[in-house]
Image (spheres, rainbow, N blue to C red):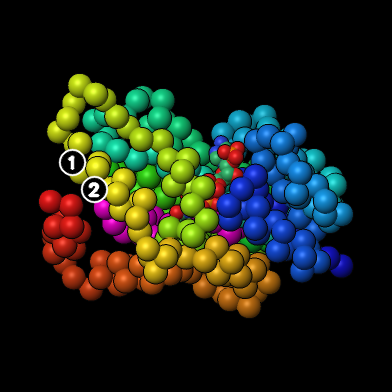
């Protein structure tokens, strides 16, 4: 019998590619997105069903998870993919943007996991694959503290949950990817700005420049990430953390191999 995967944030980027790939491999796919009325591509697959879901809206979370379970009978794998980035100096961030960063990237997965646990307990197990970032296990640049917070918190959540879900046969996985060649994410970043405060202007200029001009060697092919998700979902890989890409692996190795003070100074020197 075909297995079923439930994915958040399938309107673009990694979520959409993952939905299509799993459908092509014969899985049933519950593809969720905030604006299903705009979708024209995933609707062409007979084994993809689309559900409306903003991961920050508890009522929509309840409805989408209930509808997906009732449509497919059993959900085997859930991918917490929906995410966004708020960048810029913390001092300049708007109150709502601070809360929204946490609401989407961290509270969102909490909402999804809590909604699915009764079902996974009932069917005897399952798997949550969580799309984090290498920014969830190390810092890499200035002005990303809110994004770092949201993904570090996601990593802590998932690692902490391991112990209580293991006896229930519910598996947890984390993927730490770097920048994607498909750059919707960067295009959608919310930048904290305040024309009255110029103290962070030079650093912001350097970071925006880095985002705009990073060569392909610093970015991951999104299909490599999709394949990693597939490897985890199908059980070929049992890795708790999968770090993808040369940049992520380099930075995480560096972070783990030198004292934190040395690591911080190395990164800061690039932006001084
Ligand atoms: N691309 C990168 O550079 C990069 C690097 C490391 C990690 N990641 C992580 O990879 C994941 C996927 O990002 P991506 O690269 O595929 O970027 P993307 O193309 O911008 O996709 C983000 C997806 O999340 C959805 N989303 C945003 N807020 C949502 C909400 N409140 N409820 C439900 N869905 C919401 C977006 O839907 P809408 O169309 O409705 O906005 C979109 O479908 C994210 O978790 C991101 O943090 C990305």
The magenta region covers 128-142
Residue furthest bottom as drawn: 236
Residue 247: quarter of image:
bottom left
Instruction: Name the spot of residue 141 as percent of width and height, x first.
Output: 26, 52
Q: Is residue 204 above or below residue 128?
A: above
- Decide whether residue 109 is among the magenta residues: no
* Marking on residue 226: none
Residue occupying image coordinates x 31% and y 59%? 138
Q: Residues within 10 Å of mark 1 (few under 14, many from 20)?
A: few
- Find numbered disc 2 in the image and state the secondary structure of the residue it sits on: helix
> In the rendered image of this protein, does residue 254 appear above or below residue 97?
below
- Residue nearest the viewer, comparing 229 with 193: 193
Tell me the SS state at disc 1. helix
Q: How many labels does the image show?
A: 2
| Cα–Cα span, label 1 and label 2 | 6 Å
Q: Do the residues labelled 1 and 2 touch (CB within 8 Å)?
A: yes
Which residue is identified by label 2?
Answer: 206
Closer to the camera, 17 or 147?
17
Pointer 1 residue: 202
Whether residue 155 sits left or right of residue 198 in the image: it is: right
Q: In which quarter of the image is the N terminus?
A: bottom right
Q: Quadrant of residue 234?
A: bottom right
- Under 8 Å from ligand 1: the CB of mark 2? no
The residue at the point 72 percent across, 59 percent down is 20
Left or right, 129 with reference to 185: right
Query: Pointer 2: residues within 10 angstroms few (<14), some, or many (20+)?
Result: some
**Residue under the image location 84 percent in, 45 percent down:** 70
From where the camera sits, is residue 168 visible? Answer: no
Residue 222: x %, y % from top left:
55, 63
The residue under the point 72% across, 48% down is: 31
């Amino acid at each position: 019998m075909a297995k079923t995967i439930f994915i958040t944030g399938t309107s673009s980027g990694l979520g959409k590619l993952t939905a299509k790939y799993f459908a092509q491999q014969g899985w049933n796919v519950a593809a969720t997105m905030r604006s299903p009325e705009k979708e024209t591509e995933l609707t062409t697959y007979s084994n993809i069903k689309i559900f409306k879901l903003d991961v920050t809206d508890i009522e929509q979370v309840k409805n989408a998870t209930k509808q997906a379970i009732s449509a497919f009978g059993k959900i085997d794998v859930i991918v917490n993919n929906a995410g966004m980035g708020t960048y810029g100096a913390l001092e300049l961030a708007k109150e709502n943007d601070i809360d929204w960063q946490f609401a989407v990237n961290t509270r969102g997965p909490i909402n999804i996991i809590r909604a699915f646990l009764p079902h996974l307990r009932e069917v005897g197990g399952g798997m949550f694959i969580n799309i984090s970032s290498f920014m969830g296990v190390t810092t890499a640049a200035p002005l990303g503290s809110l994004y770092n917070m949201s993904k570090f918190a996601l990593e802590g959540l998932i690692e902490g949950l391991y112990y209580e879900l293991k006896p229930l046969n519910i598996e947890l996985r984390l993927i730490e990817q770097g920048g994607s060649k498909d750059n919707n994410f960067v295009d959608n970043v919310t930048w904290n700005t305040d024309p009255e405060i110029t103290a962070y202007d030079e650093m912001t200029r350097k970071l925006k420049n880095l985002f705009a001009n990073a060569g392909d060697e610093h970015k991951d092919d999104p299909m490599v990430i999709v394949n990693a998700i597939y490897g985890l979902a199908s059980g070929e890989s049992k890795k708790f953390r999968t770090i993808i890409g040369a940049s992520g692996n380099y930075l995480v190795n560096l972070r783990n191999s030198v004292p934190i003070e040395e690591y911080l100074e190395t990164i800061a020197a690039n932006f001084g």
